[in-house]
Image (tube, rainbow, N blue to C red):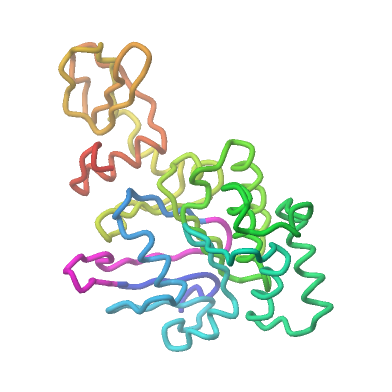
Amino acid sequence: MSNPSGLAIRGLTKTYGNGVKALAGVDLTVAPGLYGLLGPNGAGKSTLMRTLATLQTPDGGSIHLDGEDVLAAPQRLRARLGYLPQQIGAYPGVSGRDLLERFAWLKGRTDRAARRTEVEVLLERVNLSDAAGRAVADYSGGMLRRFGIAMALIGSPRLLIVDEPTAGLDPAERNRFHRVLADVAAEAVVLLSTHIVEDVENLCGRLAILARGRIVAEGTPAELSAALEGRLWSRVVPRGEALPEAVQLTAVPAGTLAVVVADSAPGGDFAPHRASLEDAYHVALAAAGLSDEEA
């Protein structure tokens, strides 16, 4: 590999038995640090995450982590992997501390004293020490997400995959979660899959936008936004007035903010619109043939 440090994905494809093509030739190069994967529901994000986590096999393509062939030796990847899925299950009556210890043992932490020390450190890191003796099944949504990241961090993984990690979290919980991810990214490849643009904009140095199983845009948040400078125009459409064709429609107090793409001012009181990553996301989806409602 020309750049063996990090994650390299080439030509990844996956079609399900019902004919749905979830991945249609995904190519990505992800260096150590936080990398965002943006896309609407049904874009193929979860399929890509499960494939990278070796929970399912692709139809074609390759995955390398630090130069090692993941598909040829999935067990080697699993020993270096942390995975936080969208949903976290819990056994009734099992405490957070006990469940973490069991999971640590399954990941090869057979030394009892070392395992217990690692578990206590992780509980403190995600601010769950006080709740460690409570049943995980009784945790709130925010506590479950924090518990999930503690599970994913067992063994100091080289690759950490987090799928829609802040869905349902309040602002304080989101900020706490972001700080943990940023700390981990100092020494690992962290792939953050989400449809929340703000999460990626605040955390990730680079990102890719996935739509209909393909990467339709890739770069830094600044690069993707800068590519649209001078080509975006917006106006507030009062309630009751017909909405124009637009790449983004956002409710505002006075009506609907419509953002359109054009090489010159389209008229009709449209004014220059400063491009953001949110705009770049919607423009990329529109170019892929997805409407604002589908996105």
Q: Please tell me whether residue 76 is drawn above or below residue 13 in the rendered image.
A: below
Give the image quarter of residue 294.
top left
Q: What residue is shown at x 66% (from left), y 53% (from top)?
A: 180
Front residue (pair 229, 238) = 238
Compared across the picture, whether 127 is left or right of 9 comes to: right
Q: Main secondary structure of the magenta part?
A: strand
Quarter of the picture holding the C terminus: top left
Question: Residue 263's x, y, as percent?
Answer: 21, 29
Residue 249, quarter of picture: top left
For residue 56: magenta?
Answer: no
| Residue 16: x %, y % from top left | 23, 71
Q: Residue 285, image x and y in percent?
A: 27, 45
| Residue farthest toward the front in the current orientation of the protein | 93
Q: Which residues are magenta?
A: 13-34
Q: Is residue 239 above or below residue 185?
A: above
**Residue in view at x 29 percent, y 21 percent:** 234
Q: Residue furthest bottom?
A: 72
Between 61 and 263, the one nearer to me in the picture? 61
82 above or below 107?
above
Q: Residue at x 75, y 67 (%)?
A: 119
Q: Is residue 282 left or right of residue 8?
A: left
Q: Residue 185, how many percent across, how many down?
A: 62, 59
Residue 15 within the magenta-colored segment of the rendering: yes
